Image (cartoon, rainbow, N blue to C red):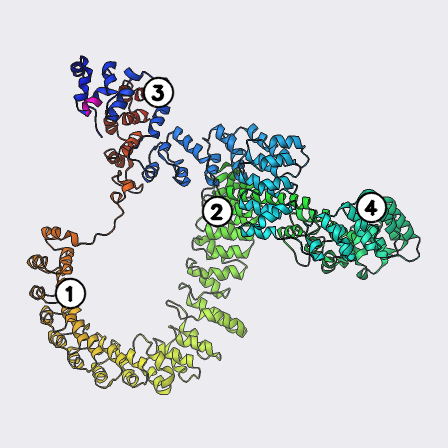
Amino acid sequence: MELLRSLTISDLEPFLADPTQLNTQSVALQLAVASYSPTPRPLLEVLVNSPHAPVAEAAQLHINWAGEISEDGQNAVEEVLKSRYLGQNDKLAVELLKIAPVPPLFLSEWVPSQYLIQALSNPYLPLRYHLKLLERLAKEPSLEPRLQVAEDPQTPLALLESLAGDLELAIRLSVSYNPSCPPELVRLVQEQHEIASDCDTDVEQLANLAQSRWECIRLAVAQNPSTSQETLLALAADKVFKIRLAVAKNSVTSAQVLAVLAESDLEIQAVVAAHYNATEEILEKFSQYPNTNVQLTARRKPESNIDLIIQQRATPGEILEKIVDRSHNQQKKEIAKHPNVSTNTLEKLAEDSSSRVKLAVAQSFSISTSLREKLLEELATDEFKMIRAAVAGWSKTPLHLIQQIGSDTLSKSEPDLLVCAALIGNFQTPIDLKSKIIEYFNLLKLDYDRNLELCIALKINEYLPIVQEDKRRDFFYKIHSRDIDTIAGDLYSPIYLLEQIAALGTQNAHLAKNPATPPEILVQLARQPVEKPINNVKPAKPVKPVVVRQIVLNNPSLPTLERYRLLIVLEQEREIAEANQLLANRLNSSYGLAQIVETGDQNTKIIAAGSKKTPIPILEQLAKDSDATIRQVVCQNPNLPLPILLDLTQDENVNVRLILVRHRSSQIEILKRLAQDESDWVRAEIAANKNTPVEILTQLAQDSSRRVCGTLTGNQNTPVEVLEFLGVEKKLASAYNRKTPGNALAAVVEDTLKRDSRTQKEVFEYLLRNLEGSQMPASTLEKLSTNTTSWIRSDVAHHRNTPLSALEKMIDDTYEPVLWGIARNPNSSPQLLERLLNKHDEEVTGAMVERNEIPVNLMERLLENKSQYVREVVASSHNLPPELMAKIIATESEEPVLISLARNPNLTPELLTQFIQHSNANVRTALVRHPNLTEAHWQQLAQDRALPVREAVAVSGNVPAQVLELLSTDEKVEVRLKVARNSRTPESALVALTRDEDLTIRAAVATNPNLPSAQLEQLAQDEKVEVRRAVAQNPNTPAAVRASLQDLVIQPTARQTQTSPTLRGLSRLYNPQTDDLATVLSEYAESDVPFVRFVTLLHPLTSVEVLQQGAQSASWLERYAVADNPATPTEIKQQLAEDSNQIVRVVAMKSLA
């Protein structure tokens, strides 16, 4: 930091007569004069034109030249800093932004928003910097930055007003819950959004709302099917992509508007190409486009196939009119039901000879009322009863026709059940007519198994008095879901039957898929949020609501406008769900906290219930949630207060109480309460808990549940007297608990022997485990040794408590695992084992050598075994007699057995002398590691003919020094190399090796820590760089020699700030775990990068000494930083309030005010 030269008035006198003399002075003096408060204007007039920028700027901002400024000075500073380079870069600014007040204008547009978001939590950032960052984040296109602004309580009203109408619902919700947001602003946006979304809003109001500054309002207008084409045309040019896309998706958007959108983005072009109103010109244009998606959409035009044309819901009415004469009756019916069928086509079809076609015309949504009534009157007397029933059951049939059909039906002697069912099921049929038909034909006495239609009709009319009187019949019991699905999915099912099935209230995928289903029913199905069973009847295969909705959307009978409206509703629901999910995960969000309990779904509540950041009041509410899963999660939260936990001990859900025991095992009050729980699962969990007090464990011993008492036997803290009581009185014991007394175990064994074989297997499987510390009585095991069950005898034979007398009884057992147990059992005597080996040699040798100690009397016999594994184990035995060792050396031919003996630490020097002569080089190599080798043995091995043996000697850590000296002259490089590296090699041998002609030897000896300094200096002059590098890496190399070889050492890559040009201004990076920030700032104040010094002087933790220096800096920006620092002492600010610089002066005075 360069300081200003100190001046007095007398220093200015030489220049007053001729101010131009200042130009001949040093820059330091010129800068001091330009920064001196009393400097008169004539001198400043010369200095403002100085070729030195710092001098000229200081003079231009001098109060005697520029005068005082009325504003606070911050705007003036920002204007200067915008174009001032102080050595800053984005990486350096971001690094400092973590810990210091970096002015936001130093952050370029390329700085990622996540760093700006992190800076919002910087406690050293002044409010004005914080607000600047909020302004910048509010303009970011991605969601998270704007969401941060919407949630920040310091966000100014202007930004909140802008975000209140954001396209993202999550942002609008966050704004509405921001404590700084006026409620009237939220209400205004919500009211306008509701109006803009309402299909009944008049076009003029929508046109006005289309000019709203809020994007969400314009989007709602763009989606509204009631919006005029003029307004849609204006919105098609909106700057926001999502609004233009919504215009393209609007089902009423005209060809004129689509033509404008056809010039827009590729995604919008694909939507335009699929639009019902897209003209041939637009499609032809798109078909030439290079974009594949747009091409494919544009070419999806109906072919000549009539069925395909009819199935396309976008087929225009004029095409349907052209094909009607070439269609058969079924196709005509489908044309009549088509959402785009024209009036002319319906009038032509109304003259058709087929009554089925006429019925389809009558039931079309596009037909006039007069033509519909004319056709229904004709069809009401049709010769086919199915047609008459269809008219009688349809909800839109006029009342006088229903009564006419009813009168005709009552005039007959025999009931027409199909027509009767249709009349009864129709909600438009008068109640007295329904009752009269039921009573007249005695319909309640019929067999409903063959009259499904009548059964359904009666079910949906259960409220009728005459039906209520018959309490014996459950009409709906006769209805099978399979039958309903069949009717609902049948393309030829009458509409009235489909209406009745819909009236049952169930979501039916078959009904949703059927093209014959009336549009109003499709809409009803799509809007039902949950699939519920109807009384006792459930769908054959329950379908999730979202699946049913998708099926409905694919139904060609759903009118285009209804489909569009439904898509908007679904999109809104998706948006709401995503926003709630997003915000519920933000536990620092006001909205998230408010919505978790009120409207959060299960996943949202689970996240909040398990988070350590969730406030206690929210946890308390979640602990009372109706969903047991939520309560299970929240009771595991370590922050949940004890009173709430105690309340949860009374929870109705047993899993909640179980989790309390498992996760609150150290809280005694909870354990005491749950020890009295009604569920034996909970009490058993208490019994198993290692933290349960002894008095509670003792109390639980009287529990009536065997599960509880059985669990209690496994607890290591259960008192011995309680374990004894449980074993003797309740016949429960755990073999895994070492404290279980023998009489308890014996009692359980006696009780188990009285039970069936299955129970015995379950109990003995763990009770007879061969566990260390088991107190199983020897008498009990002896009794079991004669048990008829072979696996029980095997467990006894293996048990460490089984006495020798019992083992002797089992020596003739025919079950091999029993014999293995005797062979392994530590209680088996050498004599018993010898008898066992004599009787069952092949069966037991493998088990015999698994003993901790093999008896000596068996070893010779085992060494004759044909199994190599058996002989290996015997050869390694610590108690193997020397004579048997000598026998192995002399007679054994298998290398693994010999190597096993070579590793036996009990080999005597005499045996080693014999063994070293062995012909197998691998065996001799194994002997190099033996602890009993004498110097003679080492000498002999060092002269071994096999190279691997000499190499093994050269690397040994026990080899005598004289042997290494001998090997240092070995003819083989491999041996000398290992000698050169061995830390036991004597100095004389190392000196000799420095003269070795082999490069690798000299390099190896150069790394040996025992090599004398003289030889290191000698090798430092070696002609080979590898040798010199090895010398440089030797820790004992003299410092001067190492310094001369420093360039040869490969330096490890270190992450130091000096290696990064962008961070060169920082002496080190601040580590909050190890560094003191004030200390690091004192280092930063000495940086040679002005930007680092500037930010440091702004920091409130910068020391007073550094601030005092900064107040005298030659840079007015550094003096400004001191003046702006809230921690600067008053006396320093008073000094700066008299500064020559108009900006420094006004900032200092403002901070003093």
x, y (%) of residue 174? Answer: 51, 36
At horizontal 29% and vertical 27% (from top left) the residue drawn is 1117
- Position of the C terminus by quadrant: top left
At horizontal 47% and vertical 37% (from top left) the residue drawn is 146
Q: Is residue 245 magenta?
A: no
Regarding residue 458, the answer to whether it shows in the image is no
Q: For residue 855, which quarter of the picture? A: bottom left
Regarding residue 1005, the answer to whether it shows in the image is yes
- The mark lying in front, picked from 3 and 1, is 1
Question: Which is more toward the observer, 924 or 623?
Answer: 924
Q: Helix or strand or loop: what does disc 2 sit on? A: helix
Q: Is residue 1112 left or right of residue 89?
A: left
| Magenta stretch bounds | 27-31
Cα–Cα span, label 3 and label 1: 76 Å
- The mark lying in front, picked from 2 and 4, is 4
Magenta span main SS:
helix
Residue 610 numbered tag: 2
Residue 771, compared with residue 1070, is above or below; it is below
Mark closer to the chain start, 2 or 4: 4
The amino acid on which the numbered mark 4 sits, given as a three-letter code, is Arg
Identify the residue under disc 1: 1000
Residues packed near mark 4 inside 10 Å, few (<14), some (14 to 19) or many (20 plus) = many
Question: Which is more toward the observer, 464 or 701?
Answer: 464
